[in-house]
Amino acid sequence: MNALRTALVVVTWCLGATALAAESDIDSPLLSWVGKFPSDTPVANGGTLLQQAGLRKTLKALLPAPEVKRLGEFDTEAPVRRVDDYLVVDKCRPHACPADTATIVIDLRSDRVWAGFFTRSAAGLATRWYGNRDDWNALPPAIVTDFLKRHGSIAP
Amino acid sequence: MTYEEIVKLVAENNQSKEFSNEFVTCLIWKETSFEPSEKNSKSSATGLMQMTKGAVEMVNRCSPKGVHFEHSEMTDAVKNVQCGTLYLDIAKNKLGGVDTSYGTGPGYSRGIVACESCLQSDAVHYQAALQKIHN
């Protein structure tokens, strides 16, 4: 009976350790931004999140120039979130947040990056997704749902 | 925050004598998409109603004794709505109107008023009202 109890304790410990390892084996400097604002500089003289060399280069290659300009105008921002193995960055236009908004998603386990934009004007509306490797439907559904809620396409 | 949470928050904390709960709800949607921790990276605008340091100081100057807010409290949704709705009345009555002293200039509140009117006539289909906010 004692041997069985010991075996159960060992198995439980191993499963817990495996789960912890899966959670913590991502070693990305971008994790410094979780809970902070994208424009924060958590490392002295290290720049903002979108100024990080790899990410900046990827976004510049991925996005048409007008979208890069638009993103630069989105000064209203939420703290950076981690959803599973992804960082989520929400930014929008001051005084028009649900009408002109963007979400940047960074896969912490690979070099995959997505940028989703939504615009609503008197003339109509548009959603644009850009991905350097995969389309938007490769994203976790929770991230897509949050994007839709932020501009009211589904009930906030 | 969800729409229902914002409606409850505004109903319990709207200090304005000039603006309806629906107007405030629509303004919060326009400013931050109901996200209480939003900040502006280039100004001090903070929280649901994007309160700046100057706006908080103005509320403190114009409010009766005992009413005082700190700008550092503006990510607190309750404090933000209390302070922000007091500021709306100051903006309307002492600063030349909400469009110029709160928003981006003439036309700022047009979508908010359309949203307010839509919510007052049909709160059940609130999503349609929120979609009145556009660029």
Image (spheres, coloured by chain):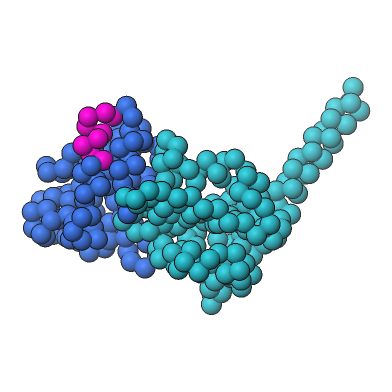
Chain colours: A cyan, B blue
| Horizontal side of residue A78 vs B73, given as left or right | right
| Horizontal side of residue A46 vs A3, given as left or right | left
Considering depth in this image, is B33 or A137 the residue closer to the camera? A137
Considering depth in this image, is A86 or B47 the residue closer to the camera? A86
Report if residue B67 is visible in the image.
no
| Horizontal side of residue A114 vs B125, given as left or right | right
Q: Is residue A13 above or below residue A111?
A: above
| Horizontal side of residue B105 vs A31, given as left or right | left
- For the point 62% across and 56% down, which residue is it? A131
Q: Position of residue B59 (x, y in %)?
A: 17, 56
The span shown in magenta is: B115-123
Quadrant where the N terminus of chain B sits is top left
Quadrant where the C terminus of chain B sits is bottom left
Considering depth in this image, is B111 or B27 the residue closer to the camera? B111
- For the point 78% across and 44% down, which residue is it? A18
Report if residue A53 is visible in the image.
yes
Q: Is residue A83 above or below residue B104?
A: above
Q: Is residue A134 above or below residue A48?
A: above
Considering every residue shown, the one lying at the far left of the view is: B93
Considering every residue shown, the one lying at the far bottom of the view is: A45
Q: Position of residue B52 (x, y in %)?
A: 27, 61
Q: How many marks?
A: 0
Q: Quadrant of residue A69?
A: bottom left
Considering every residue shown, the one lying at the far front of the view is: A123
Question: Magenta region, mostly helix, strand or loop?
Answer: helix
- For the point 42% across and 38% down, which residue is it? A156
Q: Position of residue B69 (x, y in %)?
A: 24, 54
Q: Position of residue A141 (x, y in %)?
A: 59, 40
Considering depth in this image, is B69 or A3 the residue closer to the camera? B69
- For the point 26% across and 28% down, which residue is it? B122
